[in-house]
Amino acid sequence: MSSMSFLEKLLDGVGVEWKALGGVAKNLNSMRKPITSGLRDFGDIPYYGASGIVDYVKDYIFDGDYLLVSEDGANLLARNTPIAFSISGKSWVNNHAHVLKFNTYVERRFVEIFLNSIDLTPYISGAAQPKLNQQNLNSIQIPIPPLNIQAEIVRILDTFTELIAELIAELIARKKQYNYYRDQLLSFEEGEVEWKTLGDLVDINTGSKPPEILESATNFDYINAGTSRSGYGAASNCEGDTVTTPSRGQGGIGYVGYQREPFWLGPLCYKLQSIDKTVLINKYLFYFLQSRSELLLGLKKEGGVPAVNKSDLIKLEMPVPVLEVQQRIVAILDKFDALTNSITEGLPREIELRQKQYEYYRDLLLSFPKPVEVVE
């Protein structure tokens, strides 16, 4: 698949019939049976809902190969996960996913790819709770080229899918490797290095609310409670090379961030900066706290809004090897971090590029012209 001529030859002159999905697949919704969580007998049979497996049960109502399509839920519009997904073997399906049966793997997979590529908004009802009912599902128009063409399209796109899956598996393995080496590098024998409290090593303070929180990107991230930026600022109140961790809020306590560039520090977040960089490197501090997030979680005060008090934070102890050792540890972990987390290099970047490549060829291969009578 190295040239456009191949794609043109594959699609050129192909007779394509458009059919309603209800005439392409057999709908087995009448066989579904929802079971409330308290009444389920735990087992090894997957229990499916709108977006995938939600539990495991002892019994099954389906045994074979099926295509499930989300019937309701916010994901019908958000599309954070596929709304159509294949299942095989024994299974139980609740009433939040349509169950479709096809004659062949190729037909099932072709329709799965097509449904995940199109905008379903015209078929969805309900604002508060989006729903794709059976009547609307059955009315979705599907292009049906000859089976051999469907098979070739599926083969091409599955090749991309398998490559992406391999890259994701490699990324997961590399992250485990990264965590292992990070923990090893930051573990020291008793008496090997000096231990000091954060209060002796680090300047710790919270910030303030910016004059205006912007949604559009600027040069300055707004860092507050939570595990990601809270917006953007028009200016900065904190320099780069700074470690941050939320001081208050739901879900953010224990998270450790590193800000390379100047940013705006919010009122619900601590900045941690080395008092003397000849004694402690900020990036080393980041890697240590990141590897010991349980220490920060252990300081969390419950009741109302979870919080970490500065008076407790300054008492945390950390190992402080000589500067050369800190620099070596940081250099090693920076390389692992770039490989496993960087969106501009390493595996995440490769996965992103392959996903875009897949979407490009998917849209190209499924761009069959619609007859006037089925144009939406």
Image (cartoon, helix red, strand yellow):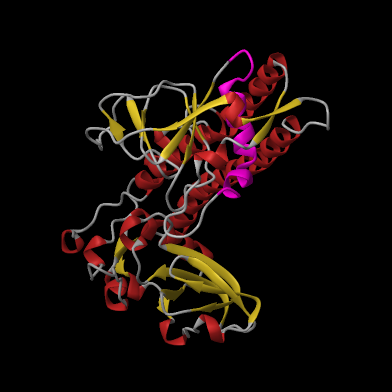
Across and down, in percent, residue 30 comes to: 42, 87
Across and down, in percent, residue 75 comes to: 36, 61
| Residue appearing at x 57%, y 28% in the figure | 338
The number of discs equals: 0
The answer to whether any part of residue 15 appears in the image is: no
Q: Is the magenta stretch mostly helix, strand or loop?
A: helix
Q: What stretch is highlighted in magenta?
A: 277-299
| Residue appearing at x 42%, y 38% in the figure | 269
| Residue appearing at x 36%, y 56% in the figure | 79
In this view, 128 is above or below 62: above
In this view, 58 is above or below 255: below
- 285 is within the stretch colored magenta: yes
Single out the residue that lies furthest toward the front. Answer: 311
Tell me: 166 left or right of 231. right
Image quadrant holding the C terminus, namely: bottom left
Relative depth, front residue between 311 and 189: 311
Relative depth, front residue between 266 and 77: 266
Relative depth, front residue between 72 and 228: 228
- 275 is within the stretch colored magenta: no
Across and down, in percent, residue 262 comes to: 39, 22
Tell me: 65 left or right of 264. right
Relative depth, front residue between 259 and 297: 297
The answer to whether any part of residue 282 appears in the image is: yes
Tell me: 311 left or right of 141. right
User: Residue 90 sits in which quadrant?
Assistant: bottom right
